[in-house]
Image (cartoon, helix red, strand yellow):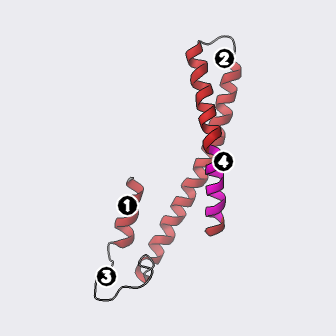
Amino acid sequence: LAYCIFYVVVGYYNYPLGDKTCYCSGNLTGSTNVHFYLTFVMFSMDILNVIVAFWLMRYNRIKIREYRSSASLVVKFCFRQTLRSIEQTLPVAVIHLACFSIQY
């Protein structure tokens, strides 16, 4: 939410509200550099999201193997639930990164 608010404030603070508006209101010559920078930040966050998801998936698999017989049922359940949720959301994150990479 904070990134979206920052994007709108920085990208459109100098937006002309005169009598004529251009067709694509987000592409002004004064805000081109700002949009390029903010798109790069969003792309970097996307890459970081996929890297951290793969790392967390690996970490949870290691912990599940470690606690196979020694940990309580609640701890094992937490690791398994985290692993299942990452496995469900990771394909969406990878597809989003691929599409955004093509667009960028």
- Numbered mark located on residue 6 in the image: 1
Q: Residue shown at 58%/50% (left/top)?
A: 48
Q: Is residue 95 above or below residue 11?
A: above
Mark 3 / mark 2, whichever is N-terminal? 3
Q: Quadrant of residue 22?
A: bottom left
Residue 104 placement, left or right of 11: right
Mark 3 / mark 4, whichever is N-terminal? 3
- Where is residue 24 shown, x and y percent of the image? 45, 80
The kind of residue tagged 4 is: Pro
Q: Nearer the viewer, mark 3 or mark 4?
A: 4
Work out whether residue 37 or residue 23 is closer to the camera in this orientation and state it. 23
Contact? badges 4 and 1 (CB < 8 Å): no
The kind of residue tagged 1 is: Phe
- Where is residue 77 shown, x and y percent of the image? 59, 21
Mark 1 / mark 3, whichever is N-terminal? 1
SS class, disc 2: loop
Alpha-carbon span between mark 4 and mark 2: 27 Å
Q: Mark 3 highlights which residue?
A: 16
Alpha-carbon span between mark 3 and mark 2: 61 Å
Alpha-carbon span between mark 3 and mark 4: 41 Å
Residue 7 placement, left or right of 46: left
Q: Spot the residue most to the bottom.
A: 20
Q: Nearer the viewer, mark 4 or mark 1?
A: 4
Mark 4 / mark 1, whichever is N-terminal? 1
Alpha-carbon span between mark 2 and mark 1: 43 Å
- Numbered mark located on residue 91 in the image: 4
- Where is residue 21 shown, x and y percent of the image? 36, 85
Q: Dot 4 surroundings within 10 Å: few (below 14), some, or many (20 or more)?
A: few
The kind of residue tagged 2 is: Tyr
Alpha-carbon span between mark 4 and mark 1: 28 Å
Q: Dot 1 surroundings within 10 Å: few (below 14), some, or many (20 or more)?
A: few
* Region of the chain picked out in magenta, as a range: 90-101
